[in-house]
Image (spheres, rainbow, N blue to C red):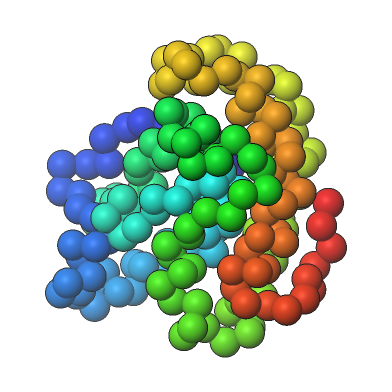
Amino acid sequence: MVCFASQQAGNRSYSLERAMRNPTHAFAKAVHSQFDLDGTIALDEFVANDDRHQGNIIYAPGKQEFWLIDHGRSLTGTYWDMWGLDDPAIEVRNLLVDHSVAEWDEAVRNRILKKAHGLVNKCASLCLDELDQDGYFAKIDPATDRQDIINFLRERIHHTVPLLCNRLQLGHLSLTQP
């Protein structure tokens, strides 16, 4: 499920950035087995989140859960017009990819691309016109029109995989776009 929400991750939670400074074996195992890096990369590309870094990935060891926080520069806000984020074809930073892509082999890159393809296919099957019928967008940013977000996502579906393919330095689209 792809969604935005707000909830306390737990009293003893901390950022992935902090945890990576001196990782325990249990933490390294949890990251490897439970954190969906591929899905996070795909989601951030889809919503044009140019600000995801390890500091806004929270790990709650008691629950062994990872939480993505700080989506303030995706889908809403005064930055949209200023940074061209109202254009669904815009290429924005994707820090989780940009900092590591040189280390990944083609199999890893294709796995990420496959995850993105699955995400956009699922999103394409949603009725985006029904998105946010309860008015939460207005609570987050009253200046952003709900229909603008819907239109952006509807168009972004068609750009996500090609943009990510370029970012992953794959010279071809190995998957079919919806």
**Quarter of the rendering containing residue 107:** bottom right
Q: Which of 136 and 91 is in front in this view?
A: 91
Is residue 146 placed above or below 88 in the rendered structure?
Answer: above
Picture quarter with the N terminus: top right
| Residue in the picture at 30% in, 74% down | 28
**Quarter of the rendering containing residue 172:** bottom right
> Left or right of 157: which side holds 22?
left
**Residue 38 picture location, percent across and down:** 54, 64
**Residue 160 picture location, percent across and down:** 67, 54
| Residue in the picture at 79% in, 39% down | 125
Is residue 117 placed above or below 165 in the rendered structure?
Answer: above
> Left or right of 161: which side holds 149?
left
Residue 149 visible at all: yes
**Residue 116 picture location, percent across and down:** 65, 58
**Residue 142 picture location, percent across and down:** 45, 14
Is residue 143 placed above or below 53 in the rendered structure?
Answer: above
| Residue in the picture at 15% in, 74% down | 22
| Residue in the picture at 34% in, 74% down | 29
Q: Which of 161 and 63 is in front in this view?
A: 161
